[in-house]
Image (cartoon, rainbow, N blue to C red):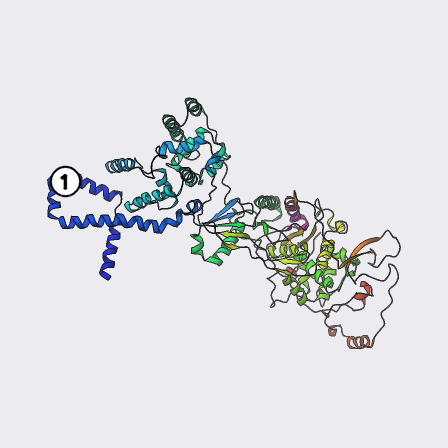
């Protein structure tokens, strides 16, 4: 058995070395032999000659059988022929437009033959295979002529292959010129002709040729050279393409030899005329036509670089790098290429505008709240900036600043610790040595919770954080899909001001949950993955869950979309052409500036700053990130119908006074309509003093226990405090806010912005 294996291996090595130089050498040796010597050799070696002939016959029989068995599946459909040699990965946007390739993949955009002008196919036939419609897939005379000429010459001057054989070579087999491959080419060409019509074959041929400048197929070539559809090609342009395929780099009219390309074009036009495919008038007109080139810049790999690399990481995790590199996968992503372009342009322009303010990078994320699909993702302002552009800041954890506040306010609303009309204290306060301050370094006394959140006041936010408790605040953030909060870190009360680091994509998706009425969707990057044969092997798998009640999500959306109430601090800096909820964030020393907002249709998050966490020069979220946010929001909403935030059944509307947040009985100029969770609306009337709560025995015990020592005050309770039957103000003033000792690093404490 081992001897048989050895002989078989030797035979295979012998077959593989039978290439053109080997045959040429043997041909020259035979030409130098005398006829008498050949006859004498045959007579003296009849046994070996018989074995050689028998072996040759067996090989000639076995190779077609083996070739058929191995390659027959690749000829089963036109799609398999088109995609057989695909490798790497092609990424499509959600509208099937290719925008990125991975692992040296190439894109194809086939076009049907019936759409092309009749003369286009004859341009190729006239120069490559004039008897195309008359032979069975190969030409004996062509092969014989090519063999003789190639053996006698020092270079390949005759191809000898029909269009059917060239298609097999281009689409199915390897490009080497060994005898075995040429024989397989002939066998498969016969099978190709048996399975498909001549028009099918020429269509596949035109769509699989390489035309230079990165274009595969005549449709891509037409777009690349002329910026138009292949159905609009003139006769002269068709002849030009038929000439390019012989040597694409050399004959490329853009980067190759233009004069030679035009001369070959004229040669083909004359061949078409000689073979009767065009008339005298057509020939004269085509020869006199001045071809005008309108090259389209290569769009593939120019957009969504960071997004594409995220897809690559997902595929490698799922299938392994080697398999992905050789896969020929086509991935239909969630990306909207037009919106991606708009987002990239907005980020790049704003970062360049702010370079003088020590701003070196920016990022943006756009998510469909209803599905979790990422519609655009800008990881940096410019991928080509080797120093700042290569890190994907959309997924790099950074402090979110005050954009974290809605998460804590939402938890307080859900637990009924506050309502939007609760009066919160905005005055100097110390929580065990921690003294939060507002951006303006001023105090407003008591303010509505709505006003405090909409205008991003810090001190009221810390009071709310104290009511909720840090542990519950962390749980609330995790329910919204935030994964970077650690149990080993003592964030303390500054958590509400954005002390924890969170990726922009997670913050944006948390806001998308408010837009989706409290229903959280895991964000997704792709819709489906197809193999090279068009078979779907992986589909989007989105996780969905109820993160918070729809009623609470509505209250947050109502507050963050209140243009009128936030005007005191932000003016119109956050307003767009329709109602949108939005929040900004700025961290200490202006190291990060964010703006995140949404409508029911899209959620957009924007970050600007520096990769190395160095400070910017007084660039706040409302000044640095908000202009980008507004541009992306307008681009994403253009052409979409206006949708409003839906008031759930669990939310009621009631008139309250702006001064104290209490119920209005009579018409007053200070009244405004407020939303409440059912059962939490204030019952006390505006301007009427609230009765002092009756002191209980427990209250006395608490007073005695706390007498003279504030450090021994009890920790705040995480138990929800019902507000039905008493005013929100009373609910807060009845339980003093305890002073909590915490240690913070003032250089990393987030601040608010104006």
Compared across the picture, whether 351 is left or right of 73 comes to right
Looking at the image, how many numbered discs can be counted on the residues?
A: 1
In the rendered view, tell whether residue 561 sits above or below residue 33: below
Percent of width and height locating residue 617: 64, 50
Quadrant of residue 271 within the rendered picture: top left
Name the residue furthest front. Answer: 194
Disc 1 packing (10 Å; few <14; some 14–19; many ≥20): few
* Residue 440 in sight in this render: no
In the rendered view, tell whether residue 594 sits above or below residue 159: below
| Residue 506 colored in magenta in the image | no
**Helix, strand or loop at mark 1:** loop
Percent of width and height locating residue 443: 77, 57
* Tag 1 residue: 33
| Residue 616 colored in magenta in the image | yes
Percent of width and height locating residue 357: 62, 47
Quadrant of residue 690 within the rendered picture: bottom right
Query: Is residue 538 or residue 372 the one in the foreground?
Result: 538
* Residue 720 in sight in this render: yes
Compared across the picture, whether 329 is left or right of 156 comes to right
Quarter of the image with the N terminus in it: bottom left
Q: Which residues are magenta?
A: 602-631
Percent of width and height locating residue 456: 72, 55
In the rendered view, tell whether residue 717 sits above or below residue 169: below
Quadrant of residue 201 within the rendered picture: top left
């Amino acid at each position: 058995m081992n001897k048989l294996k050895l002989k078989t291996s030797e035979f295979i090595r012998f077959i593989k070395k039978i290439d053109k130089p080997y045959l040429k050498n043997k041909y020259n040796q035979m030409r130098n032999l005398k006829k008498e010597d050949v006859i004498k050799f045959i007579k003296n070696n009849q046994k070996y000659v018989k074995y050689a002939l028998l072996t040759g016959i067996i090989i000639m029989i076995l190779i077609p059988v083996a070739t058929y068995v191995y390659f027959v599946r690749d000829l089963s459909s036109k799609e398999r022929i088109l995609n057989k040699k695909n490798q790497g990965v092609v990424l499509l946007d959600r509208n099937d437009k290719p925008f990125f390739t991975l692992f040296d993949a190439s894109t194809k955009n086939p076009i049907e033959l019936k759409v092309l002008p009749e003369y286009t196919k004859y341009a190729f036939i006239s120069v490559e295979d004039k008897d195309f419609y008359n032979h069975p897939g190969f030409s004996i005379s062509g092969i014989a002529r090519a063999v003789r000429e190639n053996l006698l010459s020092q270079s390949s001057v005759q191809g000898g292959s029909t269009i059917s054989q060239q298609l097999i070579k281009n689409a199915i087999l390897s490009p080497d010129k060994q005898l075995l491959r040429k024989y397989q080419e002939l066998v498969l060409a016969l099978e190709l002709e048996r399975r498909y019509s001549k028009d099918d074959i020429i269509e596949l041929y035109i769509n699989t040729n390489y035309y230079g400048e990165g274009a595969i197929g005549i449709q891509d070539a037409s777009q690349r050279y002329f910026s138009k559809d292949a159905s609009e090609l003139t006769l002269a342009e068709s002849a030009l393409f038929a000439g390019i395929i012989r040597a694409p780099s050399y004959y490329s009219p853009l980067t190759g030899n233009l004069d030679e390309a035009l001369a070959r074009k004229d040669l083909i036009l004359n061949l078409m005329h000689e073979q009767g495919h065009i008339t005298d008038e057509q020939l004269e007109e085509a020869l006199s036509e001045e071809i005008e080139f309108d090259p389209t810049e290569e769009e593939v790999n120019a957009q969504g670089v960071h997004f594409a690399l995220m897809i690559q990481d997902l595929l490698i995790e799922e299938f392994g790098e080697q398999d992905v590199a050789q896969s020929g996968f086509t991935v239909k992503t969630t990306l909207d290429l037009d919106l991606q372009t708009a987002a990239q342009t907005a980020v790049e322009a704003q970062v360049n505008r702010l370079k003088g303010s020590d701003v070196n990078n920016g990022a943006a994320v756009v998510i469909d709240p209803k599905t979790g699909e990422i519609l655009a993702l800008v990881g940096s302002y410019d991928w080509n900036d080797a120093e700042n552009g290569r890190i994907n800041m959309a997924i790099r954890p950074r402090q979110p600043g005050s954009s974290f506040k809605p998460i804590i306010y939402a938890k307080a609303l859900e637990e009924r610790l506050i309502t939007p009309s609760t009066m919160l204290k905005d005055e100097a306060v110390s929580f065990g040595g921690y003294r939060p301050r507002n951006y303006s370094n001023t105090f407003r006394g008591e303010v509505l919770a709505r006003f405090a959140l909409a205008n991003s006041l810090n001190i009221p936010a810390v009071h709310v954080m104290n009511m909720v408790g840090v542990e519950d605040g962390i749980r609330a953030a995790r329910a919204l899909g935030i994964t970077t909060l650690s149990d080993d870190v003592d964030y303390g009360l500054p958590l509400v001001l954005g002390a924890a680091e969170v990726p922009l994509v997670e913050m944006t998706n948390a806001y998308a949950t408010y837009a989706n009425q409290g229903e959280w969707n895991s964000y997704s990057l792709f819709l489906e993955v197809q193999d090279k044969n068009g078979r779907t092997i992986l589909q989007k798998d989105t996780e969905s869950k109820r993160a918070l009640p729809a009623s609470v999500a509505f209250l947050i959306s109502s507050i963050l979309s209140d243009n009128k109430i936030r005007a005191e601090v932000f003016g119109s800096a956050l307003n767009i052409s329709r109602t949108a909820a939005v929040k900004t964030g700025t961290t200490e020393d202006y190291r990060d500036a964010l703006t995140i907002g949404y409508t029911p249709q899209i959620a957009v998050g924007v970050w600007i700053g520096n990769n190395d966490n160095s400070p910017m020069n007084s660039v706040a979220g409302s000044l640095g990130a908000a202009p980008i946010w507004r541009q992306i929001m307008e681009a994403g909403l253009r052409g979409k119908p206006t949708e409003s935030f839906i008031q759930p059944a669990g939310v009621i509307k009631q008139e309250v006074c702006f001064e104290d947040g209490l119920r209005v009985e009579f018409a007053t100029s200070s009244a405004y309509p407020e939303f409440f969770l059912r059962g939490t609306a204030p019952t006390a009337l505006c301007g009427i003093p609230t009765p002092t709560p009756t002191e209980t025995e427990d209250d006395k015990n608490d007073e005695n226990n706390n007498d003279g020592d504030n450090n021994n005050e009890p920790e705040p309770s995480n138990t929800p405090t019902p507000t039905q039957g008493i005013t929100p103000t009373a609910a807060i003033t009845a339980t003093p806010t305890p002073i909590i000792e915490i240690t913070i690093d003032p250089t990393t404490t987030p601040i608010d912005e104006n």
